Image (tube, rainbow, N blue to C red):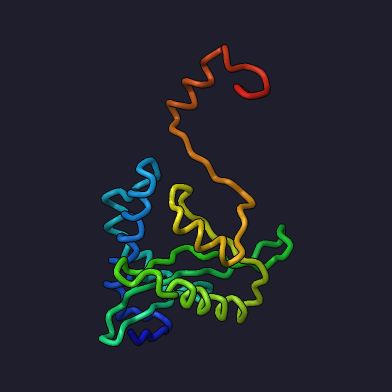
Amino acid sequence: MKIRLRDASESDLKALVEMRVALQKHLEVRDPEIWKFSQRGFEIAPLEVKARLRSKSSYVGVAEDENGRIIGMIMAEAARDEYRDPERFGHIHWVYVDENSRCRGLGRSLVKTALNFFSRHGVEQITIGYVVNNPEAHSFWNKLGFVARVTHSSATLNSIAMRLSDASKNGCGKDA
């Protein structure tokens, strides 16, 4: 299969939104407790993707098959934070490859296109985030040299309040 990698454009909006929604659904299957798209989220997804396409600090790339059908996408962003060293960093927000096109190197190829974008923006360090219960993502990013440095965790307000009200859990150690 011959694959063409290119920068995305607004004419790709429909396919990009479909992939963005498919990515979210994939994440929800991997971890049913992860945040979910609200109805409003589905409604504004096209606006979010369009804003990313228009932003000079964002990169959206696509992979298309020999028929011109988009089968993969990546969205990355170059950022600057004066409190960080290095000050310029990049973040890969989304990578999605159509289920029938996986395990063929498309994800790696899409990441390469984002690296070119990052290089042009003076980025030295790149961050990513992925769902913990997604072993394919963990393996993919690990093979590219990404190492967990920060963990983001979540809990419901009620579950935290319940644990805080349990007097037997005071102190330090295993039960904190």
Q: Is residue 149 left or right of residue 26?
A: right
Q: Name the foreground residue: 16 vs 32.
A: 32
Image x and y of residue 32, in percent:
35, 43
Residue 129: x %, y % from top left = 51, 56
Residue in front for this viewpoint, 84 or 146:
146
As drawn, the residue found furthest toward the right would be 85
Residue 131 in the image: state x and y as whole percent: 46, 51
Residue 132 vertical placement versus 66 (above, below): above
Q: Residue at x 31, y 74 (%)?
A: 13
Q: Nearer the viewer, residue 129 or 37?
A: 129
Q: Residue at x 34, y 81 (%)?
A: 64
**Residue 157 picture quarter:** top left
Q: Spot the residue most to the top.
A: 167
Q: Is residue 136 left or right of residue 169?
A: left
Which quarter of the image is occupied by the N terminus?
bottom left
- Name the residue rendered at 65%, 67% in the picture: 125
* Quadrant the C terminus occupies: top right
Number of marks present in the image shown: 0
| Residue at 61% over, 81% down | 120
User: x, y percentage for residue 57?
Assistant: 53, 73
Quadrant in the rendering for residue 103: bottom left
